[in-house]
Amino acid sequence: MKYSIVGSNKTTTREEKAAAYIFIACAALSIIAVVSITAYMIISGTPAIFKVGLVDILFSTVWQPTAGKFGILYIILTSIIGTFFAVLLAVPIGLLTAVALSELVNEKFKKVLKSAIEMLAGIPSVVYGLLGILIINPAMYALERSIYAGNPHHQMTGGANLIATILVLVIMILPTLVNVSETALETVPQHLRLSSLALGATKIQTIFKVVIPAAKNGIFSAIVLGVGRAIGEAMAILLVAGNAVKAPWPFNSVRFLTTAIVSEMGYSQGLHRQVLFTIGLVLFVFIMVINIILSRILKKGEEDD
Amino acid sequence: MKKVVSIFVAMLMAFTLAGCGGGSTSTKSNEGDLSGKISLNGSTSMQKFVTALGESFKEKYPNVNVEAQFTGSSAGIAALQKGTCDIADSSRALSDDEKNSGLIENVVAIDGIAVSINKANKVKSLKKQQLADIYTGKITNWKDVGGADEQIVVIGREAASGTRSAFEELLKIENQCKYAQELDNTGAVVAKCAATTGAIGYVSLDAVDNSINTMELDGAKATVANIKAGKYPLQRPFVMATKGKISKQNKKVQALFNYINSDAGQAIIKKVGLISAK
């Protein structure tokens, strides 16, 4: 028994035990982090709710922190609508790219495409923002001027608007969508494709009727991950969104939950700062909901298999 | 294998312990020479000035550390009231409440706020009231103030920015501004004005560069001479507030204020684009 490779209390040396404890401590670190972040968000996010009132924060549209008005309805709506349309535009592009990668293109082209997408994923978000300032904002300004020329009811934004932000977000979430859905498509067993082809279906029919339905759980989780990435993005959209608190119409300058925190945290204080933490809490709840949905999908996928 | 693991673990522990050792290096004080630290807290608008001041002060008094934090004017004043710093940097005049709580407003320099416009803009001069009307949304087209038929893109800073509160306060349009864009730093405002034909924005005078034009206000150009003479309306004091008079402060703080008033100190004020308060 002494030389057995199966561990027992007798054979475990002190070093072994110490090592085990260190590993467990490392593992516990992330749990501690999550728990303490949750506790901290709730502790620092709730006082403002009691001082201002939950309804006044969540359902008022007037954000004038220096005048004591803290309504974030427009900010919440902007985050939801901006994320929704970004995902709506990115999903078809991302999914079709993933299909091309896993089903259609040859190895050589696949390598090129794959490394391009990996590069896209590795670009820091602030660079996307700069790109937005240099290319998308001026284009939007030109478009805005031709649409709203001489219209006194529209406040010119100089091209920093919801559409520009959505376009930046689309590019930013594409890599996530492509990579995760491609992995899902790759795991579809080859015999399904072969059976479909043997029954006389064309390649495209096979892709849409067999492969994509078989990979739908993986594709759903790609979408949810994309939503999470889009709603949590701050740096890039801070540069292109214009950051005025307005209703989320296409040509309005808008502010997202993330940018609301980032842009005002530096100088804020007192109740204003507390409300920013409340916005953080709202964002945190959104992300939590997304994570719960994601884990449900993944669990369901396991059951299906 | 076990040995390897245990050596690795021991090394890991040694590193962790070593990490705890450093840090507390104490500064030795020389007789007759000043040593220790001066802590400043406050306006981010004053960062450039305070950093330059601290570096140059340290050359003269190598044993004194000028530790500056930039958390915003009001935060700095609150920290001074709590006693967590020696000097509060404020880019606005102190309120009566703040003065009544025993803080002394030492104006060290004056900052001008320039109104920045795109280079292609033909408008050269505005009345103070017209500027206020543009920012409150009553005037929305440059043709209404003598320019081309071009809608105005109103650019400002985020709420709680020192420049924004100074700007709105000086024009008496607090919380009435209708911004098309709220940017979170001075550089971004300059960049947007340079890139957007119809834009108008406001920045500290020292942030003005060749990429933008500045607007005359009430017939006065945004220049140092006009600000000192009080002709240019958009100006604000840079205050280094202390709890009680300067003469009541410790030797290090007194030395700092003496340094600001010296030729070397005044040269720094000039260098960072500010106007001397003397």
Image (cartoon, rainbow, N blue to C red):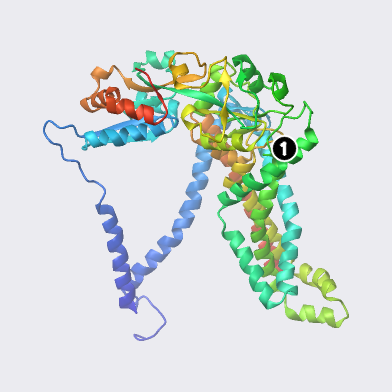
* Vertical order, B245 against A109 (above or below): above
Residue at 48% across, 30% down: A269
Looking at the figure, which quarter contains the C terminus of chain A? Answer: bottom right
Looking at the figure, which quarter contains the N terminus of chain A? Answer: bottom left
* Vertical order, B184 against A175 (above or below): above
Report if residue B160 is visible in the image: no
Q: Amino acid at mark 1?
A: Pro
Q: Foreground: A2 or A149?
A: A149
Q: Position of residue B182 (x, y in %)?
A: 60, 33
* Vertical order, A189 against B107 (above or below): below
Q: Foreground: B9 or A19?
A: B9
Report if residue B69 is visible in the image: yes
Q: Splitting the image into 4 quarters, where does residue A106 fall?
A: bottom right
Q: Splitting the image into 4 quarters, where does residue A76 fall?
A: top right
Q: Is residue A141 left or right of residue B189?
A: right
Q: Chain of mark 1?
A: A
Mark 1 surroundings within 10 Å by alpha-carbon count, few (fewer than 14), some (14 through 19), many (20 or more): many
* Vertical order, B129 against A178 (above or below): above
Residue at 53% across, 20% down: B221
Q: Position of residue B201 (x, y in %)?
A: 59, 29
Q: Is residue A83 left or right of residue B225?
A: right
Residue at 79% across, 28% down: A150
Q: Position of residue B161 (x, y in %)?
A: 51, 29
Q: Foreground: A112 or A260?
A: A112
Q: Which residue is mark 1?
A: A248
- Secondary structure at numbered mark 1: loop
Number of numbered discs on residues? 1
